[in-house]
Amino acid sequence: MAEETIRPADPAEEEGGTTVWARVLDHDLTHSFVKSKVTVLAGIVTCLFLIGAFGAPVLAPTNPFDPATIDLMDGFTPPAWTADGNPRFLLGTDDQGRDMLSTIMYGSRISLLVGFAAVFLGMVLGISLGVASGYLGGYFDDAVMRLADVQLTIPGILVALMIDGIARGILPRELHDDLAIYVVIFAIGVSDWPQFARVTRGATLVEKNKEYVAAALVIGIHPALIMIRHILPNVMRPVLVLATIGLALAVIAEATLSFLGVGVPPTTPSLGTLIRIGNDFLFSGEWWITFFPALTLVLLVLSVNLLGDWLRDALNPKLR
């Protein structure tokens, strides 16, 4: 009878499967998250908003942008639980007969897409300039920081309005609606870069004096590679916290621009556009048209802010 061969355990298998999950569950961040009931609730609410927004084409009761599903006779239908409500429309309809729940889900997707893209753009600009100015120093550092100081003296929404106005003045009028979302993303992202630059510059000033950077210089690594491979990963912790809070601020900025009529066009409504449209009917009794988009915006921003506050405290070694 052939002798059975015992195969040694593969370290990769030991680290995989349940072991990885055990490490995740045993991590300090996991314990900190589970310990706070408010943070858990904020996480659940944020996940529900993300699922509802990005799953809108599948989860929404109707497509509010498909004329075949819209009937003007359904316009101004109140929420389903009111006396004149229709069970087909849980949150009622707007002036065009569009289901408010479906419109909010699609509008949230636009707001979140603009928020994520604007934060990413602000991070790329801010981190690049912040790490470079902190590592290189000299006149470049002075120029970047003075530019950041000047921009920080102006409210971010005014900077975004100015950039949006300049872009609309440069672009042909027939392209305004087609490029409106990209203009809003660019305007919000450019208005947010100073915060990222200041945080990464401060962290870079600390990291560049450490021994691992000196060792990299001694063995002849190019300064650009040192900034990308060595310094950048070590300054990302505060940036992630700032990005989480910045997402909520970017969503508010987009809603503000759209409410003022200079953001996302009405053909692709966001939460700000829906609030602006509903505001026209607020005093005529159709309160739900503006109330539910506004409530969605408040809950979304509040939950993201709570997650950002938790992440800031959880990643602060002084509070452990």
Image (cartoon, helix red, strand yellow):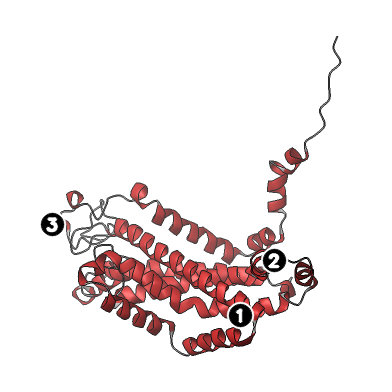
Local crowd at mark 2 within 10 Å, few (<14), some, or many (≥20)?
some
Distance CA(mark 1)–CA(mark 2): 16 Å
User: Which residue is labeled 2 in the image?
Assistant: 230
Left or right of 32, for residue 244: left
Q: Residue at x 28, y 76 (%)?
A: 170
User: Which residue is labeled 1 in the image?
Assistant: 133
Local crowd at mark 3 within 10 Å, few (<14), some, or many (≥20)?
few
**Residue farthest to the front, as pictured:** 220
Task: Locate residue 48, reporting x and y percent.
Answer: 46, 56
User: Which residue is labeled 3 in the image?
Assistant: 73
Left or right of 270, for residue 309: right
Left or right of 158, for residue 221: right
Task: Locate residue 244, reporting x and y percent.
Answer: 54, 68
Residue at disc 1, secondary structure:
helix
Task: Locate residue 130, reporting x and y percent.
Answer: 59, 77
Distance CA(mark 1)–CA(mark 3): 60 Å
Residue 302 makes an appearance in the image: no
Q: What amino acid is found at the position of numbered circle 1 in the picture?
A: Ser
Q: What amino acid is found at the position of numbered circle 2 in the picture?
A: His
In the picture, which quadrant includes the C terminus? bottom right
The residue lying toward the viewer, choosing from 62 and 228, is 228
In the picture, which quadrant includes the N terminus? top right
Left or right of 209, for residue 304: left
Q: Nearer the viewer, mark 3 or mark 2?
A: 2
The residue lying toward the viewer, choosing from 184 and 253, is 184
Q: Earlier in the sequence, mark 1 or mark 2?
A: 1
